[in-house]
Amino acid sequence: MRISRYLATVLTVTAATTTLSATSAASASAAPSAGSLRAGVFKLTNAERVKAGCPKLKYNSALAKAAQRHSADMARHDFVDHVGSDGSTMVTRARAAGYTGFSALAENVAAGDKSAAAVVKGWMKSPGHRANILNCSLKHLGVGYVKKPGTAQGTYWTQDFGAKF
């Protein structure tokens, strides 16, 4: 199975698209919680930034809300894209979630990855996704994750980045 990964950015980052292969893995142990997976993505993203000399991103609840809503929408409708099933965009979702007055936004989405390490590793192998993660001018991050068995992808991930004036 091939999983498409998309990257759409507005204002400061160039859009890119890459296709990566998903790996299947059966887990004999208890699955981590959605919250721990989101926290893992946050931690691993900041670790990559620190290695590159960027400051750590700060958690932003509005961006987290926008990211979670988008991951849920992708899972509910079994798609992976930056345009929501209702026509929403990263910008409209951020504003609707209360993230306003921004100077930059960027978004990474993915599907099919089974762990925080796998999704961040995949993003870091993609030039466009990597550029978002390592964009030192971005200051805030929210992470969304939804697992929905029975869909083509199974897992849906969103990172919403931002910076304010």
Image (cartoon, rainbow, N blue to C red):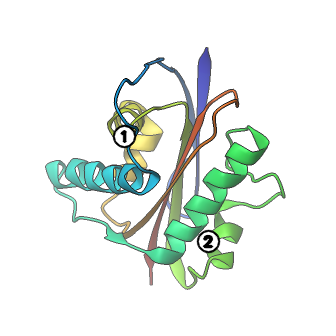
Q: Quadrant of the N terminus?
A: top right
User: Where is residue 80 drawn, in percent x and y?
Assistant: 67, 39
Sort mark 2 into few (<14), some (14-19) or many (20+) by Cα contacts within 10 Å. many
Tag 1, which secondary structure?
helix
Name which residue lies at 40% across and 31% down. Answer: 122
Q: Is 61 located above or below residue 127 in the figure?
A: below
Q: Residue furthest right?
A: 86
Number of labelled discs?
A: 2
Q: Amino acid at mark 2?
A: Ala
Whichever of labels 2 and 1 marks the residue nearer the N terminus, that label is 2
Tag 2, which secondary structure?
helix
* Towards the viewer: 95 or 76: 76
The residue that label 1 is drawn on is 120
Residue 136 badge: none
Q: Quadrant of residue 78?
A: top right
Sort mark 1 into few (<14), some (14-19) or many (20+) by Cα contacts within 10 Å. many
Q: Quadrant of residue 28?
A: top left
User: Where is residue 149 drawn, in percent x and y?
Assistant: 63, 33
Q: Amino acid at mark 1?
A: Val
The residue that label 2 is drawn on is 94
User: Where is residue 22 drawn, in percent x and y?
Assistant: 51, 21
Distance, label 2 to label 1, CA atoms, is: 22 Å
User: Where is residue 111 drawn, in percent x and y?
Assistant: 57, 35
Name which residue lies at 69% across and 26% down. Answer: 152
- In the displayed structure image, the side of residue 20 where residue 38 appears, left or right: left
* Towards the viewer: 153 or 60: 153
Q: Quadrant of the C terminus?
A: bottom left
Q: Is 6 located above or below residue 55 in the figure?
A: above
* Towards the viewer: 129 or 149: 149
- In the displayed structure image, the side of residue 25 where residue 73 appears, left or right: right
Name which residue lies at 68% across and 44% down. Answer: 75
